[in-house]
Image (tube, grey):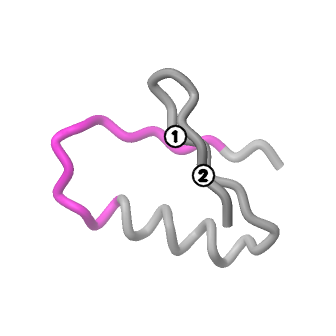
Amino acid sequence: MKSQIQGDELRVSSKSRDDLQATISLLKESKLDVDLQFVNFR
């Protein structure tokens, strides 16, 4: 898995779709005080 910050965005990439889905689930379950938006570029 690879991540990088691009301006106001955090980009996470991985060959494994399961890893990406687990990352999204973790972020959704976290009590973060920021608005999150998930975009799939595949």
Amino acid at pointer 2: Ser
Residue 11 placement, left or right of 7: right
30 shown above or below 7: below
Cα distance in 3D space between marks 2 and 1 = 7 Å
> Which quadrant of the figure has residue 8?
top left
Residue 29 placement, left or right of 21: left
Query: Which stretch is magenta?
Result: 28-39
The tag on residue 22 is none
27 shown above or below 6: below
Residue 15 place in picture, x, y as percent: 81, 68
Residue depicted at x 54% and y 36% = 5
Residue depicted at x 38% and y 40% = 36
**Where's the N terminus, which quadrant?**
bottom right
Q: Secondary structure at mark 2?
A: strand
> Residues at badges 2 and 1 in contact (C-beta under 8 Å)?
yes
Amino acid at pointer 1: Leu
Taking the magenta stretch, the answer to whether it contains residue 3 is no
7 shown above or below 36: above
Q: Which residue is mark 2?
A: 3
Residue depicted at x 69% and y 46% = 40
SS majority, magenta: loop
Q: Which residue is mark 1?
A: 10
Q: Residues within 10 Å of mark 1 (few under 14, many from 20)?
A: few
Q: Residues within 10 Å of mark 2 (few under 14, many from 20)?
A: few
Residue 23 place in picture, x, y as percent: 50, 67
Residue depicted at x 24% and y 37% = 34
Q: Secondary structure at mark 1?
A: strand
Residue 31 place in picture, x, y as percent: 17, 57
Residue 2 placement, left or right of 35: right
Foreground pick, 18 / 15: 15
